[in-house]
Amino acid sequence: MIDIPDLYSVYSSSGYIGIFIISFIGSIIPFIPVPYFPVLVTSALDKSLDPNLIVLVSTVGAVLAKTIIFTASYYGRNILSNKTKTRMLPLQKLLGKYGGTGVFVAALTPIPDDLVYIPLGIAKYSLPKFAIFTFAGKFILGAVIVWGTVLLGRPIMDRFLIVTDYNSEYSTILITILTVLLLALVLYFTFKFDWAKIIGKWFPWAIDNSEGNSDDVNKKN
């Protein structure tokens, strides 16, 4: 069971700054689930804090963390061979058009969003678009949690905070391992598939000029 007083003490001494820090830390560690939502719930019950500022500050912290992860993946692409980059070009073009939907959904839902963000970074998805869609998703999610708590009160808060204690440590380790393995599979298929053949069946426009420089696609995005 998550102890409400312990959560409250984390941010009570530093207010919005504490909420920002917790949101950032909870989002910056890839693969390891460190949810900051319980802090949003408990802070929303503090009448001295503005619910709108709680949502905004927590969103900025989460988006900043995810942008760092995305940027690291973006520039980490430089270690890939030219052959792999060329093979990924159709995927890169497809994500350039539809990737925003995936970013938004990943930000709006409690799925392991790094599974979406890291491949997008490697595929050189537009950084400004990434930040905008991530902000929109995180902001809406935060608003639902905070204002739901403000309007419905402690009964809803208790439902958000009920977490069973049994095997909690092992559950966290298992989730982390499964997330890493799943990401490894995603990256393997991202690098190894012949995306021109796969995507060309449904999106032939994505393979036009596929022999060109992959960086040109990023400029258009």
Image (cartoon, rainbow, N blue to C red):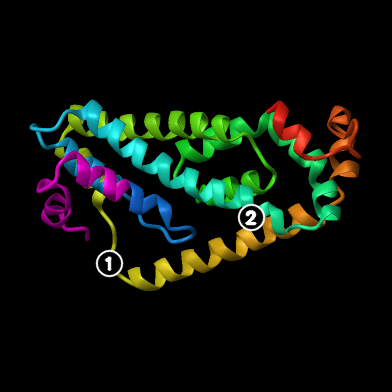
Q: Looking at the image, which residue is at 21% across and 58% down?
A: 2
Q: Earlier in the sequence, mark 2 or mark 1?
A: 2
Q: CA distance from mark 2 to mark 1?
A: 38 Å
Label 1 residue SS: loop
Q: Looking at the image, which residue is at 80% across and 49% down?
A: 85
Classed neighbour count for the residue bearing mark 1: other residues with Cα under 10 Å, few (<14), some (14–19), many (≥20): few
Residue 76: numbered disc: 2
Residue 128 sits in quarter = top right
Instruction: Give the mark toward the camera: 2 or 1.
Output: 2
Q: Give the x, y percent position of residue 47.
A: 9, 32
* Amino acid at pointer 1: Asp
Vertical order, 179 against 52 (above or below): below
Residue 79 sits in quarter = bottom right
Q: Give the x, y percent position of residue 101.
A: 60, 31
Q: What is the magenta range?
A: 1-23
Vertical order, 155 against 181 (above or below): above
Q: Is residue 135 left or right of residue 207?
A: left
Q: Looking at the image, which residue is at 28% across and 50% down?
A: 22
Q: Is residue 17 magenta?
A: yes
Q: Is residue 3 magenta?
A: yes
Q: Which residue is mark 1?
A: 165
Q: Is residue 46 left or right of residue 16?
A: left
Q: Give the x, y percent position of residue 95.
A: 70, 36
